Image (cartoon, helix red, strand yellow):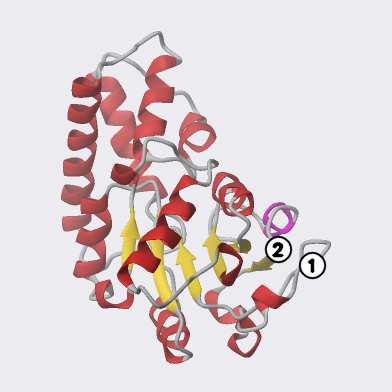
Amino acid sequence: MTLKAVLLEFNGVIINDESIRERIVDRLMLEENLQLKRGEFREVCLGKSERACTVELLSRRGRFMTETYLDRLLIRKSQAYKAQIDTLEKLPIYPGLAEFLAKIRAIGLKIAIVSGAMRSDIEFVLNRVDLAANFELIVAGDDLMASKPEPDGYFLAVERLNQQYPDFNLQLRECLAVEDSFAGIEAAKKAGIQVVGVTHTYPFHMIQRQANWTVDYFADLELDRVQELCSIVPSQPMVE
């Protein structure tokens, strides 16, 4: 089976924005007269959608919101995120990303984003760093109720790629996911997609236990092997 598409997470794979997002969540909690505990952002939010993260943090404190109120909180988070990004002269895009995307496109693969981030936030960043044209489509947190580790985002990405390219006939096993979190890796595996884990968020030895392939940097994934990834179904996780 031939590899046809690479599906990337946004937060933690494209942009190193964990500290930005944690500050925003911390401020949002304070505005709700609540307090974020030490380490709680990582525990609850990494790899999860903005919606799932917000609901979990508030429900832990006995707060149960209407959809209308939740939507208002998500809009506030998105506005705060863009405001923070706008203050940065240089965005914290991970090194080697542009080159990685160019090489993937050069061998004829489709590229999409599958993320729990808000669509407007993703588009804002991609346009700011002039990378938007590399992606055929975005599946964002606004598109789904379910969050990673559920596989719904990956299912939707394949469905939409096939709608956009009617003769493409993309199958899940013909995709490769690039993830940095345990929730993201689990989601891809539940969808039947092999996963490259990048060590942007967790140490190598922790990601290695979960992903099929583990790399420290985009450049570590040898592209002459990328075309083979879907035809290799390793019994144990592999490393680069």
Q: Amino acid at mark 1?
A: Pro
Please report contact status of discs 2 and 1: CB closer than 8 Å, yes or no. yes
Residue 195 in view: yes
Residue 115 in picture, x, y percent from top left:
40, 52
| Quarter of the figure with residue 26 | top left
180 or 142, nearer to the observer = 142
Q: Amino acid at mark 2?
A: Asn
Residue 105 in picture, x, y percent from top left:
41, 85
Q: Which residues are magenta?
A: 204-208
Give the residue pinned by disc 2.
212
**Element type at mark 2:** loop
The vertical placement of 229 against 29, above or below, is below
Q: Residue at x 18, y 36 (%)?
A: 75
Q: Residue at x 35, y 38 (%)?
A: 50
Q: Residue at x 49, y 29 (%)?
A: 40
Dot 2 or dot 1, earlier in sequence: 2
**Element type at mark 1:** loop
Q: Based on the picture, tell me whether residue 205 belongs to the magenta stretch.
A: yes
Q: Based on the picture, tell me whether residue 68 belongs to the magenta stretch.
A: no
The vertical placement of 36 against 213, above or below, is above
Magenta-colored segment: predominant secondary structure: helix
Residue 12 in picture, x, y percent from top left:
46, 56
Give the residue pinned by disc 1.
234
